[in-house]
Image (cartoon, rainbow, N blue to C red):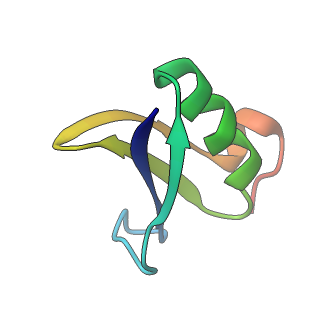
Amino acid sequence: MTDYRFYSLDERGKVFTAPTVLDCRDDDEALSQGASLVGNYQIEIWEGGRRVGTLGPEQFGLGH
């Protein structure tokens, strides 16, 4: 298992909260976990110094 960090981004793309840290088997699991964290803001997912991806409400029909 690897620690992945999930950051909430505001409308300007700036981090506005401390990250949520979750243990995930791989990038696919991290992306799946990230999808459950998406609300009104984008979620950026990092593993160490590597950005895994960004998920946003528009991908899930949540929109602002």
- Where residue 20 appears, x then y in whole percent? 52, 64
- Where residue 6 appears, x then y in whole percent? 47, 55
- Where residue 60 appears, x then y in whole percent? 79, 37
- Residue placed most toward the observer, 25 or 60: 25
- Residue placed most toward the observer, 63 or 30: 30
- Residue at the bottom extreme, as displayed: 17
Instruction: State the image quarter where residue 19 is shown.
Output: bottom left
Instruction: State the image quarter where residue 56 is shown.
Output: top right
Looking at the picture, does residue 15 appear above or below residue 49?
A: below
Looking at the picture, does residue 24 appear above or below residue 17?
A: above
- Residue placed most toward the observer, 16 or 26: 26
Residue in view at x 46 percent, y 80 percent: 17
Instruction: State the image quarter where residue 2 is shown.
Output: top left
- Residue at the front extreme, as displayed: 1
Where is the C terminus found, in terms of image quarters?
A: bottom right
Horizontal arrangement in the rendering, residue 61 relative to residue 57 (left or right):
right
- Where residue 62 appears, x then y in whole percent? 82, 50
Residue in view at x 33 percent, y 70 percent: 14
- Residue at the left extreme, as displayed: 49
Horizontal arrangement in the rendering, residue 1 relative to residue 46 (left or right):
right
Residue in view at x 16 percent, y 43 percent: 49
Q: In the rendered picture of this protein, how many numbered marks are placed on residues? A: 0
